[in-house]
Image (cartoon, rainbow, N blue to C red):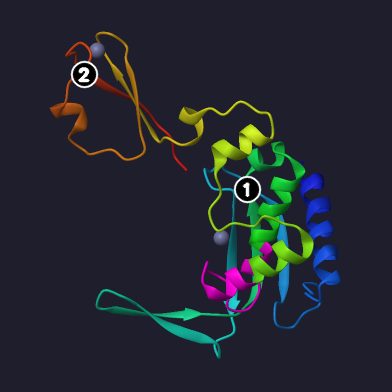
Amino acid sequence: MEEKLKDIYNKCIEELRTVEINIKDNPLIGNVDIKLAKRDAKRYGCCKQEEPDKKYYHIEKRGRKKYKKYDRFKKHHIEISKWVLELNEDIIKNTVMHEIIHCLPNCNNHGKEFKKYANYINKKLGYDIKTVGNKEEDYKKSNLPYKKESNDYKYKIICKKCGQVIYRKRLKKDLIQKYICSKCGGKLNLEQIRQF
Ligand SMILES: [Zn+2]
Ligand SMILES: [Zn+2]
């Protein structure tokens, strides 16, 4: 699978070269590597960045706090989730391309610059790069069964009496103590917590 990912990555790099975007040996980008994510995460992929070029930054405000956000990095580590590799090749390529864009200057978020590149690549190379993926849709397109519970939800709650299963993305601490089964009024039990 790792081999397949590297092949697809190289294809993407090659296609980008044809539209004047050079990823390899580009001092503005630095070093990029790609691998399969170790843990099975919900997300398609991510791009971890290191060694910011401290000359390039902007200030971001969140509430009263201000954060210094760097815009260029010298090292980029792309990780793609294993489940993505089971989908259709065009979906894998869109995912890989999405993460490659994050390596470009001023693109480590889904802001204006990221969208500019995504639109350009979509238009020029026929990609369908989005800022947020739709897992259910992508599984359907790939003719694969989509199991919501195993992918999307972190918490599985089971009624001790009737066995009704409830899935939750978030869990209020008091849910188990305070609430009872909607079907039978039985007590609830937290079955598993998936760690991502
Ligand atoms: Zn992204
Ligand atoms: Zn019940």
Q: Quadrant of residue 118?
A: bottom right
Q: Quadrant of residue 154?
A: top left
Residue sitting at x 55%, y 44%: 134
Q: Does residue 90 lie above or below 59 as drawn?
A: above
Question: Residue 156, how many percent across, how many down?
Answer: 36, 27
Q: Which residues are magenta?
A: 100-116
Residue under label 2? 182
Q: Residues within 10 Å of mark 1 (few under 14, many from 20)?
A: some
Residue 188 versus residue 125: which sits nearer the camera? Answer: 125
Cα–Cα span, label 1 and label 2: 38 Å
Question: Residue 37, how many percent across, how many down?
Answer: 62, 48
Residue sitting at x 59%, y 77%: 51
Residue sitting at x 27%, y 21%: 189
Label 2, secondary structure: give it: loop
Q: Quadrant of the N terminus?
A: top right
- Residue extending furthest top? 162
Residue 188 versus residue 137: which sits nearer the camera? Answer: 137
- Which mark, by number, is residue 37? 1
Residue 162 versus residue 38: which sits nearer the camera? Answer: 162
